[in-house]
Amino acid sequence: MSLANTKTAYGAVTRSLHWLTALGILIMIPLGWIAHLSPWATEAELATKAQLFSVHKTIGVTLFFLALLRILWALSQPKPAPLHPERKAENIAAETVHWLLYMALVIVPLSGWIEHAATEGFAPILWPFGQDLPFVPKSDSVAETAASVHFLSQWLLVASLVLHIAGALKHVVIDRDGTLARMLKGASAGTPSAGHRVFRPLLLALAAWAALIGGGAAAGLFASEEAPEAPKLEAAQSDWQVTEGTLGISLVQMGKEIEGSFADWTAEIAFEPRETPGKAGDVTVQIAIPTLTLGSVSKQALGADFFAAEDYPTATFQAEILRAETGYEAEGTLTLKGAEVPVTLPFELTLDGDTASMTGSTTLDRRDYAIGGSMADPAQLSFEVQVTVALTATRG
């Protein structure tokens, strides 16, 4: 049994790669749709959904490397001669479908991998080599673009797969030739010829991909899904004006830390430094909840069972600024999702004339605000949510 191809037969390596790829596709495609359509309203359903996606992603990455190996091997091997060289149009169509399949077997898993690497949390790839990709930043826009390519390209993969199978069946049922036998058991068939050109099929395959991606862009499939409309926060009438700052949160989902932040918030600050313990001022912070980004679960986080951004678009933290024995702290109430809960935020303060810089953090319990009520298992979604604040303000 020859490992390499000949001019009339496929070798054992080519046939093994072909059938391993076919098996992977037949598992990956239905598994992806089952994972996509499976519910996640309860802890058990979410755990099942995450596991399905993890297996789907792991098979996808495996197929990506298998496809690269298959393409490299194919480029190094002679391609067995077509059994019907006189059927030029049919041969060009078959070769075009082969190129479509090769491209799909790279683009479909790679786009899914890029989407995964650009986000944080939920359904890791089941391997020890990490979840990131070089040159792929953590970015919602990158993830959304990759997701759109993944969605579109899977349909071209399905279409080219159907055409490929239909062609194989035609050779068996209608032509009754040795095409399938060559791939099943390495049978020799056909007459060696001077070769055939691949440029036209390659160009046709590239044109099909360009039409697919261009059509998706024209249809708006690359547009970001709209979040709940964010309220317009009024400018704070403050003794201290915030010139730059971040308001972030972090939590643990499925054993992995996820970090996010609110893009729009204001702070009304009245503050006078003091050296002894006591009240040093007041602060009121308004937060536009729909401006939260939280990796791959941003949409889920804004939903009714979590922040309920449509019904509760703002949160407010009103507090006194107190000088404590070891520094400062803001002690007050956080109003979020209709709940009012006492919160203390310790922070470090650096003063340089009329410029103040502060960093602080505190831990909230999401259950106090009825956030993620269906997620009662902290192993799936931590009860503790770390809130971090960093800002620079000038007296004005």
Image: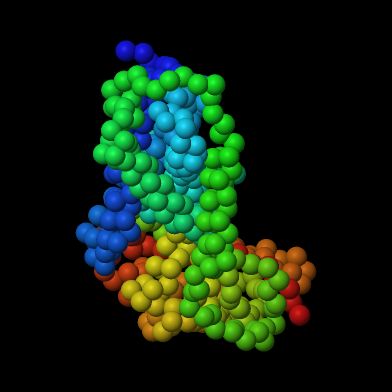
Q: Which of these two is toward me, 256 or 286?
A: 256
* Image point (49%, 37%), residue name: 88
Image height of 71 relative to 126, above or below: above
Camera-side residue of 294 and 242 = 294
Q: Residue at x 49, y 74 (%)?
A: 227
Who is closer to the viewer here, 339 or 27? 27
| Quadrant placement of the N terminus | top left
Residue reaching furthest to the left: 44
Counting the numbered discs, the total is 0
Where is residue 322? Give x, y as percent: 55, 75
Residue 173 shows in the view: yes
Residue 340 shown left or right of residue 132 in the figure: left
- Image point (33%, 74%), residue name: 305
Q: Position of residue 380 (x, y in %)?
A: 30, 57
71 lies left or right of 171: right
Res 332 visible: no
For the C terminus, the image quarter is bottom right
Q: How is the image coloured?
A: rainbow
Task: Note whether 206 is above or below 72 in the view shown.
Answer: below
Q: Residue 369 placed where, x, y %?
A: 36, 76
Q: Residue furthest front?
A: 86
- The quarter of the displayed image where residue 280 is located: bottom right
Image x and y of residue 315, in percent: 48, 80
Residue sitting at x 42%, y 62% = 297
